[in-house]
């Protein structure tokens, strides 16, 4: 055991190797990898865990891996899962500092480098102290950014092999001051769906539109009408977003060619299944009947990408209690407003009780949020995240001598 480690609080203990975790985080930042391609990253994680004497299970969800730490007692039979995501984004970085991305068009723009470093910090502390009665399961997840790495791990039997009693995850949050934590006992992130509407008309000469069925005009009507779904169909006490983010038709170099087809692509965000179903149905009805009114057809393709991230109340309150004990109760927001963004930890929360919380990053003065090309994870908060994660394990499974 490292001298005195067990005598200290997790936060104090982890602060002793803060510098090493910062170097590791910056190394990960300089070497970003896309979802399911985290070969270098998962290799570094696996080696790091093995050096700590932690049992490693690789290949769960392709590039995903799990580290298993048994407490100094295992009488409780309990198992707590902690999850970090490892993937980067397909975006170019505009930062000039030394640890900027060394790969053109790839960037850790969401701070998953920080999440990975945090969980490795937790692993180091827990492996050295083992001051709990049960098993800690450290879940290093691939492909959070849109590819459903959490689901891939579950399809590979994550919770059959490691039947966790509760699971926890964090996400850094630039809008929240460093040193603060935010959580609530219910919805944290929305369900994220993708839809595509293909409008088929009849193309022709722009000077003779009466001979055509113009899909561009139909698309315009559909774009306007879909905004009535949130305004007129969704109960104002529920939340939903319908955004059409891509409009494709015709050729900018052909001013007088009315195209045959127009295509709209967008996203729907909701928290409740009933609202999600209603929005999908209204999109289909509006698109189909508006197109029909103009003599065109419209087909809706609707994919449910990530479900809503819903905390279970007991585990969410437990996170808030643990964070309050560490950071002071004034630094813990217990009724944080949910975000209409999405998160694939939601798949894990469909299978197990648990909670997802936000770790403040500060940086409001830099004015860049997640997925901004000037974003960088704030290394100052690494021990806070790692300390809370470690404390969740210790306090969920206390050793009673
Ligand atoms: Zn992201
Ligand atoms: Zn993220």
Image: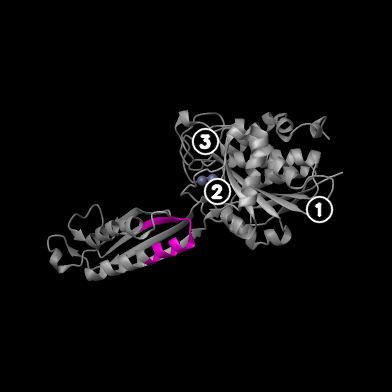
> In percent of the image, x 83 and y 51: which residue is there?
74
Q: Residue furthest right?
A: 401
**Element type at marker 1?**
loop
| Left or right placement of residue 339 versus residue 52 in this view | left
User: Could you tell me which quadrant the N terminus lies in?
Assistant: top right
In space, the residues marked 1 and 3 are separated at their CA atoms by 36 Å
The residue at which mark 1 appears reads as 76
To which quarter of the image does residue 262 belong?
bottom left
- The image's colour scheme reads one colour
In space, the residues marked 2 and 3 are separated at their CA atoms by 26 Å
Q: Position of residue 252 (x, y in %)?
A: 25, 52
Q: Determine whether the beta carbon of the residue marked 1 sits less than 8 angstroms from the nearest atom of ligand 2.
A: no
Q: Reading the chain from its start, which is encountered first: label 2 or label 1? A: 2
**Element type at marker 2?**
loop
Q: Position of residue 108 (x, y in %)?
A: 54, 41
To which quarter of the image does residue 382 belong?
top right
Q: Nearer the viewer, residue 59 or 21?
A: 21
Q: Reading the chain from its start, which is encountered first: label 2 or label 3? A: 2
Q: Is residue 150 above or below residue 87?
A: below
Q: Determine whether the beta carbon of the residue marked 2 sits less than 8 angstroms from the nearest atom of ligand 1.
A: no
Ligand 2: image quarter: top right
- Image label count: 3
> In percent of the image, x 75 and y 43: which residue is there?
394
Q: Position of residue 186 (x, y in %)?
A: 55, 51
In space, the residues marked 2 and 1 are separated at their CA atoms by 38 Å
The residue at which mark 2 appears reads as 34
Tell me the number on the disc at residue 277.
none
Q: Reading the chain from its start, which is encountered first: label 1 or label 3? A: 1
Magenta region? 265-281
Q: Residues within 10 Å of mark 3 (few under 14, many from 20)?
A: some
The residue at which mark 3 appears reads as 176
């Amino acid at each position: 055991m490292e001298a005195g480690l067990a005598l200290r609080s997790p936060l104090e203990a982890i602060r002793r190797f803060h510098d090493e975790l910062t170097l590791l985080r910056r190394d990960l930042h300089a070497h970003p990898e896309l979802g399911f391609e985290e070969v270098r990253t998962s290799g570094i994680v696996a080696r790091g865990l093995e050096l700590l004497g932690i049992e490693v299970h690789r290949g769960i969800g392709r590039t995903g891996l799990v580290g298993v730490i048994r407490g100094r007692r295992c009488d409780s039979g309990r198992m707590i899962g902690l999850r970090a995501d490892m993937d980067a984004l397909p975006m170019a970085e505009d930062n000039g500092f030394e640890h900027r991305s060394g790969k053109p068009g790839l960037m850790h723009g969401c701070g998953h480098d920080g999440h990975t470093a945090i969980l490795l910090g937790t692993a180091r502390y827990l492996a050295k102290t083992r001051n709990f009665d049960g098993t800690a399961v450290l879940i290093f997840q691939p492909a959070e950014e849109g590819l459903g790495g959490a689901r891939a791990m579950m399809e590979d039997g994550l919770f059959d092999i490691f039947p966790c009693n509760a699971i926890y995850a964090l996400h850094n949050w630039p809008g929240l001051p460093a040193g603060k934590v935010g959580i609530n006992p219910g919805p944290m992130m929305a369900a994220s769906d993708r839809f595509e509407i293909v409008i088929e008309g009849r193309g022709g000469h722009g000077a003779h539109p009466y001979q055509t069925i113009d899909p561009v005009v139909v698309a315009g009507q559909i774009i306007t009408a879909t905004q009535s779904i949130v305004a007129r169909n969704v109960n104002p006490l529920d939340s939903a977003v319908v955004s059409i983010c891509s409009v494709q038709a015709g050729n900018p170099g052909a001013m007088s060619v009315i195209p045959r087809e127009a295509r709209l692509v967008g996203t729907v965000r909701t928290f409740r299944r009933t609202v999600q179903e209603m929005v999908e149905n209204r999109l289909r009805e509006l698109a189909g009947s508006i197109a029909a009114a103009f003599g065109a057809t419209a087909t809706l393709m609707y994919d449910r990408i990530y479900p809503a991230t819903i905390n279970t109340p007991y585990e969410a309150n437990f996170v808030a209690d643990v964070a309050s004990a560490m950071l002071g109760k004034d630094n813990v927001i217990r009724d944080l407003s949910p975000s209409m963004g999405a998160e694939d930890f939601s798949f894990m929360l469909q299978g197990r009780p648990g909670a997802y919380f936000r770790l403040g990053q500060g940086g409001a003065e830099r004015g860049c949020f997640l997925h901004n090309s000037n974003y960088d994870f704030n290394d100052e908060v690494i021990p806070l995240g790692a300390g809370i994660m470690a404390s969740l394990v210790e306090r969920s499974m206390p050793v009673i001598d």
